[in-house]
Amino acid sequence: MGFGGINTHVVLDEPASRRRTAPGRRSATLAHSLQDAELLVVDADSPKALRTRLAEIAAFVATVSYGQVADLAATLQRELRGLPHRAAVVVTSPEDAERRLTHLADLLEAGENAYTAADGRSFLGRATGRARVGFLFPGQGSGQGTGGGALRRRFPEVAEVFDRAALPATGDMVATDVAQPRIATGSAAGLRVLDSLRLEASVAVGHSLGELSALHWAGALDEETLLQAARVRGRAMAEHSASGTMASLGAKPERAEELITGLDVVIAGYNGPEQTVVAGPVGDIEEVQRRAERSEIACTRLNVSHAFHSPL
């Protein structure tokens, strides 16, 4: 090539071939694993603006693929501006996201500015001050399996906890001698993940068995002691408790008392102003369910093997 009368020679040579390295085992595992759920978060400076934004996202999410929900979650998180009116949903598919976002938008349209779904997966609220984080550890009736799910696939520290626990892969996951160590293991693993993400709480509480996990969080029990205590506790309850079951009523305690009148059933937990848990023999709890249905009161049978927190 010539520039201004000066000859310039450019020599091109084929570059040495670079061998493409295969992805590491962890990268390959993450790339091929399914995400159980995604968290979609939105904020705005007014209820009206929040409703508009939720409606826009609901319309958009209906057009995306399953895999793109994760991209949407990341985008929404980056767009947060610390505004006071907030919404959040935990979703498992585009259809689930559209349904939950639309529901929140409808609530705002109706003038409802605060809401928490019964399953804990939809939220509306307004920040009025500096937030504090609290951990609530679950009791029996939580979870389903012993595999560790998405957390185990993504975090080596979770796999370490589950490997040490040596939980059974098959059998009755509801039986208390299996459920208690299973749930405590999940809580310990979850704490490992939160710690790795530097998410800290100011306070922790637990539902029944969850109190042991809260004690572990507080430093009163180390991880091995927590898992051992859950195993011993579950085995003792399986051997020395009569069978039975439990149900959650969407009613105040006074109304729950009316529904259990004449039955060998007791109030086992006061979970909220209008959520009361009852426990007793299976046949009597089934009668409570029938009475609740006739009275148009929400009643959910809990996935437990015994009538915990009762004379049984």
Image: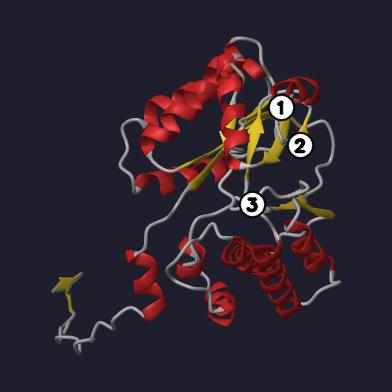
The amino acid type of the residue labelled 2 equals Val
Q: Secondary structure at mark 1?
A: loop
Are the residues flagged by discs 3 and 2 in contact, CB closer than 8 Å?
no
Residue 7 in which image quadrant: bottom left
Mark sitting earlier along the chain (2/1):
1
Q: In the drawing, what numbered circle is on residue 17?
A: none
Residue name at image x 60 percent, y 20 percent: 291
The amino acid type of the residue labelled 3 equals His
Give the labeled residue for mark 3: 306
Going by the image, does 91 lie left or right of 31? right
Q: Nearer the viewer, residue 214 or 133?
A: 214
- Tell me the distance, in whole angstroms, between the alpha carbons under discs 2 and 1: 7 Å
Give the labeled residue for mark 1: 260
Residue 96, position in %: x, y? 42, 34
Q: In the drawing, what numbered circle is on residue 266?
A: 2
Mark sitting earlier along the chain (3/2):
2
Q: Secondary structure at mark 2?
A: strand
Mark sitting earlier along the chain (1/3):
1
The amino acid type of the residue labelled 1 equals Ile
Residue name at image x 19 percent, y 87 percent: 17
